[in-house]
Amino acid sequence: MGANPTFPNEFMAAAPDTKVSAATAVLVGGEGRPSDPVRAIPMLLSAMAGGSGAAAERLAVLAAMGVARPSNWVEAINLLVKAAELGHRPAQGQLAVLAGEGPVIAGEASPDLWKTLARRIDLKGHLKALRLVQERAEPAIAMLTGLATPAMCQWLIAKGRSKVARAKVGDYQSGGWVEDPIRTGEAAGFGLADTDLILALTQKRLELASGLHVLQQEAPHVLSYQRGQEYKAHFDFLVPGEPAFQHLLATMGQRVATCLTWLNDDFEGGETPCFSSTSARLTASLTP
């Protein structure tokens, strides 16, 4: 895939919506508050009923990921159509990607375009399990082809480009995340507050191939390496004996696998010698 994204910034984020922001804060929790999707979902439903496309898009993600309910991808697509009909540009872009189309120009969309795009989505094909091919047993390494479609790759590069910043590593002293010379590339992480249906589908396809349930996976990251940047030899697992990581181990559990998928191929270098963690990590060279 080429490194230049085909989707402009207008598809990556919409204007702030205070009702959705309030619901998202309840959904995600933080600052001593637990995540509360049971209370957040009615807030989003109310906002959608009031005409919020952003709320409909959030509900689409929750339906796809199975948050506080079984996963339902048909409902997720229908909610994405609702979001697109309400003028939510990120939802419109996601429908185009899932249908294998390019960007949709605002003002040229017919009233029934979003339903038409939804009918073109091969949901059965998207949700077909990819075959893992074992490369070696020790350490366990397997390969799969086609985790993301070309349109999905272009979308994820554009989405990552809008958010990447200097990547950090876990600090043994504090348990927090800090910059370190061992890692000089950039990264963008996407949690429940800002993930979308394209990322959710990538995680679902990984689940179907590996057996690691979406809700067992860490938030996916888009990684970017410019010329000369690197991530030196390291382990992805959490060291059990380190006090700084006890909270993560207690709440998240130990990392058991890593998935790396390349979003573009117009670069040299960047080889990854082995796999060793639990999250889905999406890598891209974002050099213009």
Image: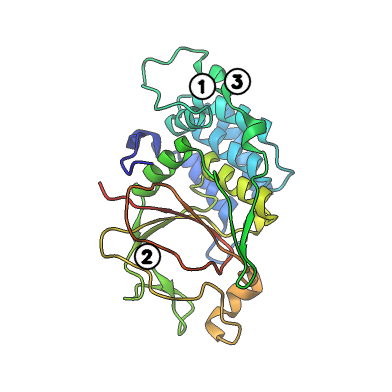
Q: Residue at x 66, y 35 (%)?
A: 73
> What amino acid type is highlighted by mark number 1?
Glu
Locate the N terminus by quadrant: top left
Q: Which mark is in front, 2 or 1?
A: 2
Compared across the picture, whether 86 is left or right of 134 comes to: left
Label 2 crowding class (10 Å Cα cut-off): few <14, some 14-19, many 20+? some
Q: Position of residue 181 (x, y in %)?
A: 31, 76
- Residue nearest the viewer, comparing 199 with 70: 199
Q: Is residue 167 left or right of residue 217?
A: left
N-terminal label among 1 and 3: 1
Identify whether 232 is placed above or below 270.
Answer: below
Q: Residue at x 33, y 47 (%)?
A: 266
Residue that appears at 65% across and 48% down: 131
Q: Are marks 2 and 3 in contact (CB under 8 Å)?
A: no
Report the residue marked by disc 3: 119
Q: Residues within 10 Å of mark 3 (few under 14, many from 20)?
A: few
Of the residues under marks 2 and 3, which one precedes in the sequence? 3
Could you say whether the residue bearing mark 1 is in a helix, strand or loop? Answer: helix
Q: Splitting the image into 4 quarters, where does residue 276 fall?
A: bottom right
Q: Residue at x 62, y 43 (%)?
A: 62
- In the depicted structure, whether residue 219 falls above or below residue 1: below
10 Å crowding of disc 1: few (<14), some (14-19), many (20+): some
Residue 23 visible in the displayed image: no
Q: What secondary structure is found at the residue carrying circle 3?
A: helix
Q: Which mark is residue 85?
A: 1
